[in-house]
Image: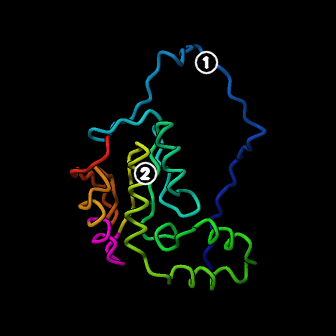
């Protein structure tokens, strides 16, 4: 009969057990630069907010962009299916756990609206923030996104398609 070899459990630490102390070298924050550059776009906060409905909406993308970060808007999510996505998100939060799956199936069966894609992109660009979106060809969102760009709703956008990141420069009517 074979003997099984068990892994030995290693000690782990919790937040209340760890203390950060200064090192031998002190760096003045005024003398550091954490800028992050993607082609012609420089972010003063090297953080990208994920394209998740519960995280990024138009208002967050604008505020985060003005602070120096980059928030990626999901063009296949609630933001482009509903005029008032906050109501839908609140409904999800208030739904009992055993009913959430059926509610989400119903919510995401609503078709993506090209008009909302254009409105969301336009709002972000008009506010002067970098417009970053996540798309796939599953719901023909690429066509909608491209139409919104051709209509002059964006000057440049960073977007994801099939796990690839692209930077697309397009003629537009809004300042960078």
Instruction: Tell me which residue sits at (46%, 69%) in the image.
Output: 80
SS for dot 2: helix
SS for dot 1: loop
Residue 57 image offset from top left, x and y in percent? 52, 58
**Number of marks present in the image shown:** 2
Q: Is residue 110 magenta?
A: no
- Work out whether 87 lies above or below 102: above
Instruction: Tell me which residue sits at (43%, 51%) in the image.
Output: 124
Which residue is label 2 attached to?
124
Q: Quadrant of the C terminus?
A: top left
Residue 48 image offset from top left, x and y in percent? 46, 47
Colour convention of the picture: rainbow
Residue 23, labelled with which disc?
1
Q: What segment carries the magenta color?
A: 136-146
- Residue at the right extreme, as displayed: 16
Asked if residue 145 lies left or right of residue 88, the reply is: left
The quadrant holding residue 135 is: bottom left
Q: Are marks 2 and 1 in contact (CB under 8 Å)?
A: no
Residue 126 image offset from top left, x and y in percent? 40, 48
Asked if residue 161 lies left or right of residue 72, the reply is: left
**32 or 116, which is in the foreground?**
116
| Other-residue count near label 1 (Cα within 10 Å), few / some / many at <14 / 14–19 / ≥20 | few
- Work out whether 57 lies above or below 24: below
Asked if residue 2 lies left or right of residue 58, the reply is: right
Residue 40 image offset from top left, x and y in percent? 27, 38
- How far separated are the C-alphas under marks 2 and 1? 41 Å
Asked if residue 82 lies left or right of residue 114, the reply is: right
């Amino acid at each position: 009969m074979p003997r099984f070899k068990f892994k030995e459990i290693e000690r782990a630490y919790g937040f209340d057990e760890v203390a950060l102390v200064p090192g031998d070298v002190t760096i003045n924050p005024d003398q550091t630069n954490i800028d992050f550059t993607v082609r012609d776009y420089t972010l003063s906060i090297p953080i990208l907010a994920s394209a998740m409905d519960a995280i990024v909406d138009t208002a967050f993308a604008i505020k985060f962009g003005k602070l120096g970060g980059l928030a990626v808007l999901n063009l296949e999510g609630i933001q482009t299916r509903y005029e008032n996505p906050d109501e839908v998100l609140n409904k999800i939060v208030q739904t009992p756990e055993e009913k959430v799956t059926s509610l989400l199936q119903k919510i995401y069966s609503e078709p993506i609206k090209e008009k909302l894609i254009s409105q969301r992109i336009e709002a972000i660009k008009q506010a002067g923030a970098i417009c970053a979106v996540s798309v796939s060809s599953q719901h023909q969102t690429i066509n909608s996104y491209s139409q919104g760009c051709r209509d002059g709703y964006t000057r440049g956008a960073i977007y994801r398609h099939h796990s690839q990141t692209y930077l697309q420069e397009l003629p537009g009517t809004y300042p960078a």
